[in-house]
């Protein structure tokens, strides 16, 4: 039993070291930047209970700041689809967050390809969401294609397209 108490934390520490070593030393700067943007979006979109109106608005703006001035969305129902500017996107995100009590997100299976010119990139990823709302609870897993554009040195999302609903 004592061996388990030392082995498990050691394995967790080793796993974390491998992940961060890969993330910081193996990936190129643009790759690291895009993965970091995705990680930050997951953090911003997650919600652990009630939040004030001002916190909700701030989170919606922070999320929308990860998108280009005009974005194309096709994420499947119940999400809106079509073109939206940053203000429309901020309003939609704020409204969605107001209707959710709790949201836990996770991203896996990321595949990133950056164009040779270093101005555009495409990432396919799987999003896992656990949601608690007034209407009940839900769990979804969806596969997306995310198109990125580099504007003024910053990677922004230009398009999100639903590829598949996995559950």
Image (cartoon, rainbow, N blue to C red):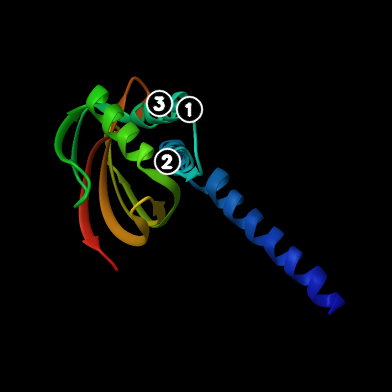
Q: Are marks 1 and 2 in contact (CB under 8 Å)?
A: no
Which residue is under mark 1? Answer: 55
Residue closest to the far left: 82
Asked if 42 appears above or below 61 in the picture, the reply is below
Tell me the mark number nearer the camera, choosing from 3 and 2.
3
Front in this rendered view, residue 5 or 151: 5
Q: Residue 19 placed where, x, y %?
A: 58, 54
- Classify 10 Å Cα crowding around label 3: few (below 14), some (14-19), many (20 and above): some
Residue 106, above or below 1 = above
User: Who's the residue at 35% across and 42% down the image?
Assistant: 99
Quadrant including the C terminus: bottom left
Q: Please report the residue visible at 30 percent of the width from the left and 30 percent of the height from the top.
A: 67
Gap in angstroms between the C-alphas marked 3 and 1 = 5 Å
- First of labels 1, 2 by sequence position: 2
Marks 3 and 1: CB-CB under 8 Å? yes
Q: Quadrant of residue 3?
A: bottom right
Where does residue 52 sit, x and y in percent of width and height?
48, 29
Residue 85 sits above or below residue 135 on the image: above
Rendered image: mark on residue 35? none
Q: Residue 57's mark?
A: 3
Towards the viewer: 94 or 163: 94
Task: Place residue 118 in its image quadrant.
Answer: top left
- Depth check, mark 1 against mark 2: the one in front is 1
Number of other residues with Cα within 10 Å of mark 2, as a class: few under 14, some 14 to 19, many 20 or more: some
* Front-lying residue, 64 or 69: 64
Q: Nearer the viewer, residue 8 or 154?
A: 8
> Which residue corresponds to mark 2?
45
Question: Tag 1's secondary structure?
Answer: helix
The CA distance from mark 3 to mark 2 is 12 Å
Q: Is residue 148 left or right of residue 27?
A: left
> Upstream in the sequence, badge 3 or badge 2?
2
């Amino acid at each position: 039993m004592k061996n388990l108490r030392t082995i498990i934390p050691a394995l967790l520490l080793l796993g974390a070291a491998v992940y961060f070593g890969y993330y910081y030393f193996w990936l190129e700067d643009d790759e690291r930047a895009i993965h970091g943007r995705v990680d930050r979006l997951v953090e911003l979109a997650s919600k652990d209970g009630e939040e004030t109106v001002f916190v909700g608005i701030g989170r919606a703006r922070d999320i929308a700041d990860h998108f280009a001035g005009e974005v194309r969305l096709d994420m499947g129902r119940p999400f809106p689809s079509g073109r939206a500017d940053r203000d429309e996107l901020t309003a939609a995100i704020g409204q969605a967050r107001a209707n959710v009590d709790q949201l836990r997100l996770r991203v896996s299976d990321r595949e990133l390809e950056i164009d040779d010119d270093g101005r555009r990139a495409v990432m396919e990823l799987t999003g896992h969401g656990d949601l608690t709302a007034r209407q009940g609870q839900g769990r979804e897993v969806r596969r997306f294609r995310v198109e990125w554009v580099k504007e003024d040195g910053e990677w922004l999302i230009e398009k999100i397209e639903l590829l598949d609903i996995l559950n």
